[in-house]
Image (cartoon, coloured by chain):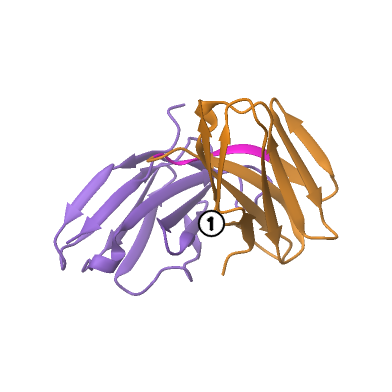
Chain colours: A purple, B orange
């Protein structure tokens, strides 16, 4: 398996533009997580899905952020409109189960810069 | 808020020395996990220790868990330059329903040749 695949690896966009980040989890994993990493706040859980259903999106900063998982092999995180404070590295991770009894497998992340 | 807090924030050692990182957490847990993150990469799962375990080994890694003190330590023996990375602890808290891992802010380890 190629692991968790995220695209793009880097994204530079202007304030106000829409940004879409993509993730392909490991086949057979039924839990998917979106995290955001910054120096100030560390790793923050934004939202997670179990069997393609959003379970908890309380970590999503505001309505500008939305996430979907239309099928077991694909998820998107969208920011519209983007702002400079959204600049961070966004990670997608997948796991066999939502609970932490299994480790998480992380993608390589998308480094987002909003100017 | 962060469930786990690593200590120290940064650690610099020479190759061949041992590196010890500590993690403290606040609530009761099912298990605690350690991850490594190389610069510009995603986190990689290293080892998981369950709440009923006190010590676990994996290669040059040794993890201890003290649930009475709500703390864990990660020991890397005979460190190598390739061990240079950030190390995070993550906790799976006891609770009802779905649970997720909560990560600390990490310890940045620099191993010099």
**Residue located at (17% from left, 62% from top):** A115
Side of A38 where B95 appears, left or right: right
Taking the spot 41% from the left edge, 49% from the top edge, the residue there is A91
Foreground: B74 or B79? B79
Count of numbered marks: 1
Question: What percent of the width, then of the height, locates residue A70?
Answer: 37, 52
Magenta residues (range): B41-47
Using residue B52 as the reference point, say whether residue B2 is left or right of it.
left
Quarter of image, res A8: top left
Indicate whether B79 appears above or below A78: above
Tell me which chain the residue with mark 1 is part of: B
Residue B63 on image: x %, y %: 74, 40
Identified at 84% across, 44% down, the residue is B53
A114, above or below A96, in the image:
below
Q: Which residue is mark 1?
A: B105
Main SS of residues in magenta: strand
Q: Is residue A81 visible?
A: yes
Q: Secondary structure at mark 1?
A: loop
Q: Is residue B96 above or below residue B101?
A: below
The stretch drawn in magenta includes residue B72: no
Find out whether residue B46 is within the magenta segment: yes
């Amino acid at each position: 398996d190629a692991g968790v695949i995220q695209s793009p690896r880097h994204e530079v966009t202007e304030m106000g533009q829409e940004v879409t980040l993509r993730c392909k989890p490991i086949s057979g994993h039924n839990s998917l997580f979106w995290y955001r990493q910054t120096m100030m706040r560390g790793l923050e859980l934004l939202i997670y899905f179990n069997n393609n259903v959003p379970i908890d999106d309380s970590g999503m900063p505001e309505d500008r952020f939305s996430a979907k998982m239309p099928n077991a092999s694909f998820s998107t995180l969208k920011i519209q409109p983007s702002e400079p404070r959204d600049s961070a590295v966004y990670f997608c991770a997948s796991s066999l189960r939502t609970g932490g009894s299994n480790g998480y497998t992380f993608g390589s992340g998308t480094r987002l810069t909003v100017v | 808020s962060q469930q786990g807090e690593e200590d120290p924030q940064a650690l610099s050692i020479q190759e061949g020395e041992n590196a010890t990182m500590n993690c403290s957490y606040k609530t009761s847990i099912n298990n605690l996990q350690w991850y490594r993150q190389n610069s510009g990469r995603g986190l990689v799962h290293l080892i998981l220790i369950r709440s009923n375990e006190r010590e676990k080994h994996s290669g040059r890694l040794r993890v201890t868990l003290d649930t009475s003190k709500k703390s864990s330590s990660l020991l890397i023996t005979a460190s190598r330059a390739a061990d240079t990375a950030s190390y995070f602890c993550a906790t799976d808290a006891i609770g009802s329903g779905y649970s997720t891992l909560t990560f600390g802010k990490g310890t940045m380890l620099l191993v010099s040749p």
